[in-house]
Amino acid sequence: QQQVKQSPQSLIVQKGGISIINCAYENTAFDYFPWYQQFPGKGPALLIAIRPDVSEKKEGRFTISFNKSAKQFSLHIMDSQPGDSATYFCAASLPGAGSYQLTFGKGTKLSVIP
Amino acid sequence: EAQVTQNPRYLITVTGKKLTVTCSQNMNHEYMSWYRQDPGLGLRQIYYSMNVEVTDKGDVPEGYKVSRKEKRNFPLILESPSPNQTSLYFCASSARWTSGSNEQFFGPGTRLTVL
């Protein structure tokens, strides 16, 4: 049973455009929602994260939007650049001791073309 | 430099030949974990460890073993590798959970091919 569903599987965006990746979760007990960025040949690295007590979090060109009632969250990359080309994973975890256990989406391969 | 290291980075082996992939972190993290990454399946957790001598199964533990005898090391053991274990493997570590962050730090990956 996949607890975090991510879409789209791949995304091509023009330089300067907005990239949007969506995730939906099933377990309402999740209380931490990070996004990880992975460049080819590298391990994933934390990009940005949000907790359900806020609806939006912004760090530079990257924004997470969170909709608790719909059980959905999304990553928006504004002014997308070729250097943003990577695979992006959304994830979710439970509170307390369960916070170590990240359930990942299947990933989105983003290509930003000049 | 704070980091998670894995060795080897690339490995080609044959069915049934026991192998170990090492993982070490220098951040004094309590939590360590192993994932495998396969196309279209994302990252799936194999085993994790909350601290020394404390390990537990993740989502896909079959065919793997782990041990945590020291805080910094968390080796992944394949006693009898099979071709379906051909994959990209990542080790990760995390500090004790706080209310502010639960960041996991990933190693560079080990690409394993089992013939």
Image (cartoon, coloured by chain):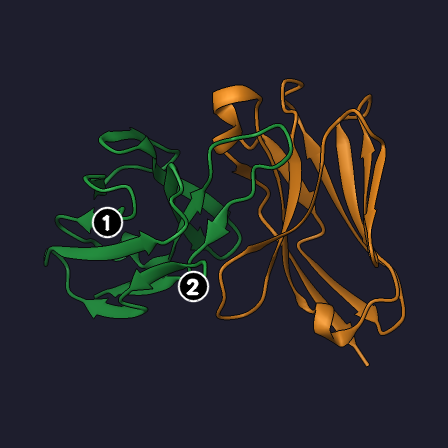
Chain colours: A orange, B green
The residue at 47%/22% (across/down) is A97
**Chain at numbered mark 2:** B
Disc 2 residue type?
A: Pro
Q: Is residue B96 left or right of residue A84?
A: left
Three-letter code, disc 1: Pro
Residue situated furthest left in the rendering: B17
Which labelled disc corresponds to residue A81? Answer: none
Residue pointed to by mark 1: B75
B39 or B73: nearer the viewer: B73
**Secondary element type, mark 1:** loop
| Residue B99: image location, x then y, percent | 62, 28
Q: Residue at x 82, y 81 (%)?
A: A114
| Residue under pointer 2 | B108
| SS state under label 2 | loop
Packing grade of label 2 (10 A; few <14, some 14-19, many >=20) is many
Q: Give residue A96's position: percent from left, percent from top.
A: 53, 20
Q: Nearer the viewer, residue B22 or B61?
A: B22
Residue A58 locus on image (x, y percent): 83, 47
Residue A26 versus residue A48: which sits nearer the camera?
A48
Q: How would you rate the neighbour count of disc 1 (Cα within 10 Å): few for under 14, some for 14-19, many for 20 or more?
A: many
Of mark 1 and mark 2, the one earlier in the sequence is 1
